[in-house]
Image (tube, rainbow, N blue to C red):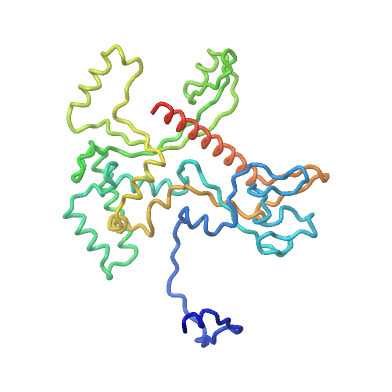
Amino acid sequence: MYRARAEGITFTKEPYIEDVGPRRIKSMKFTALSDSEISKIAEVQVWKNSYYDQTRKPIEGGLLDPRMGLANASDKSGTCATCHAKYDSCPGHYGYLELALPVYHVGYLGVVLQILKCICKGCARTLIDEDLRKERLKKMRSPKLEHPRKIALAKTLIDRCSAMTSSKAVKCLRCGFINGRVHSFSCAITIGIDLKSNDYVWSDAVKQNSFLTEHHCPVKKAVSMLGIIHDTSKCIDGNLEEFRSAISHTKEAKAPVNLTTHLLDPLRVLFLFKRMPDEDCELLYLADRPEKFILTNIAVPPIAIRPSAMVGGSHSNENEITERLKQIIQANANLRQELQEASGAFKCLV
């Protein structure tokens, strides 16, 4: 009964808080934003690649959604849908874009490579033996060990694991998975159009001159590709060479079979990073969970950072950031549609 009365009480004044004076900041911690943190700081989910509707009003869910701020300074009477401030007073608010598949962040690619060199690609544990792991973890947790020493200790572990897999493939002591050398790659891909079939033709930079010229394919555009490769060509025994030789002599082998080089796509790497225990993250001296280095959500900057300029009252000039985000949204929508169609076809087969 008393609890019911207490819940019905409405306080009209703020509780008194004693002023303790200025406080000293003890430390600051910088980490990457996770997908949930990006969505929490955002005011709206952006998923449309259109700017304005037929009445020249910003489209909700688009890149100029009024909840991220006013689109241009010409709207004198308009207010932000989030803070209700005018154009000059609104600081802008973030949105977010949910990706159909995770992607690598080019700024974190070096850190991702270092982590992949140290962990098993099967069980996501470190490649060193258990005794050495416990010894290194004890040193890393020592309160007497300063920050530069911890960085140096983590670097020696990365160099040790990298040297283990550079000379030959290593079998994981825990799950038996074969681990090889991990390295990044980048290449330019040229997209042409086959005039006979009206289909797209893909060719890399080495083959583009001969292949596209031979098939009379006009070049549409050139794009660059960035990825991570897991190379286990330096196998422990000769069984792999015997199997490759046997495959090459079969009638069914119309194309060369690559059994040693695998592409580590962001979805696979994200799965491995989520399985890493916190103790192994301490060994590598990571400030936070490694799955934050793989992008699954993209923060859309406030409109105040990328203002829209009206031209003649009927057209608008958009910022380069907005135009790039529009391309990402379009590519993301196409990928999501293809995944849904592939999933539907698989269900029909089942």
Residue 92, x across and y down, in percent: 65, 59
Residue 140, x across and y down, in percent: 27, 62
Camera-nearest residue between 47 and 307: 47
Q: Quadrant of residue 136?
A: bottom left
Which residue is at 51% across, 88% downward? 18
- Horizontally, residue 106 falls left or right of residue 63, namely left
Which residue is at 53% across, 49% downward? 298
User: Quick check: 300 above or below 150?
Assistant: above
Which residue is at 49% across, 26% downward? 205
Residue 52, x across and y down, in percent: 72, 45
User: Quick check: 344 above or below 282?
Assistant: above
Residue 40, x across and y down, in percent: 52, 58
For the C terminus, which image quadrant? Answer: top left
Q: Quadrant of residue 194?
A: top right
Q: Residue furthest right?
A: 312
- Horizontally, residue 62 falls left or right of residue 34, namely right
- Horizontally, residue 311 falls left or right of residue 297, namely right
User: Quick check: 148 above or below 259?
Assistant: below
Camera-nearest residue between 63 and 104: 63
Mark count: 0
- Horizontally, residue 222 falls left or right of residue 148, namely right
Camera-nearest residue between 166 and 9: 9
Camera-nearest residue between 298 and 320: 298
